[in-house]
Each structure stands twice: as C-alpha cells, then as structure tokens.
Image: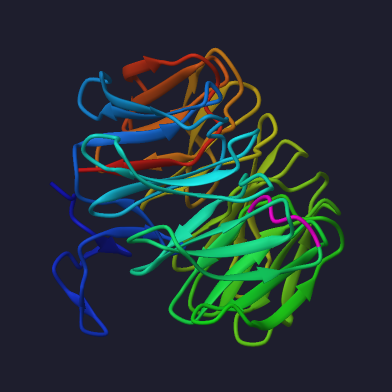
Amino acid sequence: MIPPISIDGTDITGATIDGTDVQEITVDGTPVFSAGPSAVFAGNDDDNLYAVDINNGSQIWSFNAGGNVSSGVAIDDTAVYAATGFSANSVYALDVSTGSQIWSFTKGGEFVSDIAIDNSAVYAGNRDDNVYAINKSNGSQIWSFTGGGQFTDGIAVDNTAVYAASRDSSVYAIDVSNGSQIWSSTLGDLITAGIAIDQNAVYTGDFADDFYAIDKANGSQLWSFSTGGNIRSEPVTDSSAVYFGSDDDNLYALNKSNGSQIWSFTAGNFSDGIAVDDSAVYAGSSDSNLYAIDKNDGSQIWSFSAGGGIRSGVVIDDSAVYFGSDDDNLYALDKSNGSQIWSFSAGDGFQSNIRLGG
C-alpha cells in the first residue's frame, strides 16, 4: 500500500493537482513511492538491479543488466526503469512485480546519469553528449537533444522541461514535448552533481566548489554559494531550504530564497543521496556513516556506521531509512534511533538511486 502523502505536514493523499489524482510521492519528477510489491529497488556494481522485501530484507527478484547499475533508477505503477553503462549502454524497463524485461533502449555511449520519468517518457543522459526521451510503453526514441558535453549526472523533469547537467559546465532546459533547447546556463566548472527543482528554480553544484539556484523560466542565476570542495551530491529541497553535500566534508542547509547559510554539519565527504522529512535530514558520508541531522539547527540526532563509504541514494518512509554502502550491503534503519532493521548483501557496492514500491 502506498504510504500517506504529505506536503509540509499536510496529508494530500487522494487530492488532485490540475485534475490529476495524487497517488505517488515524487522527488524532482521521479516517483519514490509507487505501486507494485512492497520493496526496495536498488542497482549494484555487480551488474544487477535488486528488488528487496521492505519488511525483512529478503530478495524478491534480481535482473542482470549486463553492466553496473550505478546511477539512475526510477519507478511507476507498472515498471522499474534502470540505466547502465560499462558495456551494456542501455536503459531498461522491467516489470515491477517480477523483474522481467519489458524493453531495452541501447546507444553507443554509456547511460550513467540519473533518469527521470513522467507519464509518457523516460529521460536519460548519455556519454555521447545526448539526452534521450524514450517512450515508456515500448522503449522507442521520442527525441534526442545534443549538448556540448557528456550528460553523466543530474536530470529532472516537470510539465514543460527536462533539466539536465552536462560536463560542458552547463545546465540545459529542454522542451519536454520536442527536445528543443529552451535555455542553457553556464556554471564555473564541470557538473557531476544531481539536480533538484521546485516551482521557481533549478539547484545544482559544480567542480568549482559552488552551488547555484537557476531561474527555471530563463536560466539566469538567482544566487550562488561557495563551499570548500567539489559538489557531487544529490540536492534535495523542502518548502524553505535546499540541502546538499560537498567534498569539504560538510552538509549544508541554505535558504532557498537568497542562498544564505542556515547551518552546516561536518563529517566525511557527502557525495550522493540525501533525504528530508519534517524533522530531520538523512545523509550518507564517505566516512561510512549515515547521519540523521536536526533540520532546524544542524545538530546530530543519531548516526549509523556501515562497513564502507555511502555513495548511494537515501530514501525514507514513515518508519525507516534505506541506503546502500560500499560494503556491499543495502540497509534499512529505524528512523527514530538509527538502529538496524535489516541488511541485504549483494556482490558489490551500491551506488545507484534507491526507490521504494508498494
């Protein structure tokens, strides 16, 4: 069953937005909760995508993708979508209940970016300098967009545009209907961070150690914030703040309206997934710890020590935090105190996004 959906603490399950029933939780246009088995879906460097029982950590199914599943994973009511490079160079659609292949989409370059989905398409960046829109029902190409560099990391979608970060130091807004460029915004260095969006802005960081808010309407830079290290993490937003990690060993909370610092929390490098709820920010670090941090003042609530660095996505539901580690394990922790509920062992480390179903 899909958990209750809330925005800023208000339950909106079953409500409508622009006439559409609210039946999923999405982050930057990508569903995190959806129908199907009650499972955690995670890609592994052993070339497999795993569906793991959310209650006890047992394996439901696995799919061998022919290459590391180390980045994009998305889910809707019927399918799980996963991107892979490292010889396979494909995006796959898999049956959410069984893991059987529905279709695959293959190009000459590696698919190592995040992926995003909407009602009709899957959007994925490739090392061949293109972003592809792929028909969700049959895997056929709808359009492609060529940028000035490889698309290896952040991508997000809303009703009008796909927003994609390129290694040519630019963020591109691409018309969702036809793949034409709406605008581009050039940052200070190559971009290997994720992208977050809200109604007004696109948020990402670069290898010049700066984090940016970019106007969604025209690509102008609203503000920037300097850190002491490269920014590679997946940012996340709530109603008032944006949260991201830096290679300067800090996790930052910034005011969304002006980019001023609210707080910072110091540990190891924060280079990937972050999740947030009404009270806490949950983030994994290269120091092998998953931290729960007070959302208001940045103080530590609890930490959990895994056996390796944490470079995967982090997702949460009402009771638990889920993430993968370089120690080859996928973990479920109690949100209230950080105690381990279960772990699932695979053949290699987990670096991909994590999604929940059921």
User: Does residue 302 appear in the picture of this structure?
Assistant: no
Q: Residue at x 66, y 71 (%)?
A: 145
Q: Which residue is nearer to you in this view: 225 or 314?
A: 314
Magenta segment range?
A: 149-153
Q: Which residue is nearer to you in this view: 105 or 234?
A: 105
Q: Residue at x 65, y 33 (%)?
A: 86
172 to 229, vertically: above or below: below
Number of numbered labels in the structure image: 0
Residue 304 is situated, as x and y percent measured from the top left of the image, at 47, 21
Image position of 37 (left or right of 271): left
Residue 279 is situated, as x and y percent measured from the top left of the image, at 38, 48
Q: Which residue is nearer to you in this view: 244 or 177?
A: 177
Image position of 244 (left or right of 332): right
Q: Residue at x 59, y 16 (%)?
A: 308
User: Does residue 283 appear in the picture of this structure?
Assistant: yes
* Quadrant in which residue 56 is drawn: top left
Image position of 98 (left or right of 336): left
Residue 211 is situated, as x and y percent measured from the top left of the image, at 73, 60
* Quadrant in which residue 223 is drawn: bottom right
Image position of 358 (left or right of 130): left
Q: Main secondary structure of the magenta part?
A: loop
* Quadrant in which residue 221 is drawn: bottom right
Q: Residue at x 86, y 58 (%)?
A: 189
**Image coloring type:** rainbow
Residue 28 is situated, as x and y percent measured from the top left of the image, at 47, 62
Point out the image quarter for the C terminus. top left
Check if residue 194 falls in the magenta segment.
no
335 to 205, vertically: above or below: above
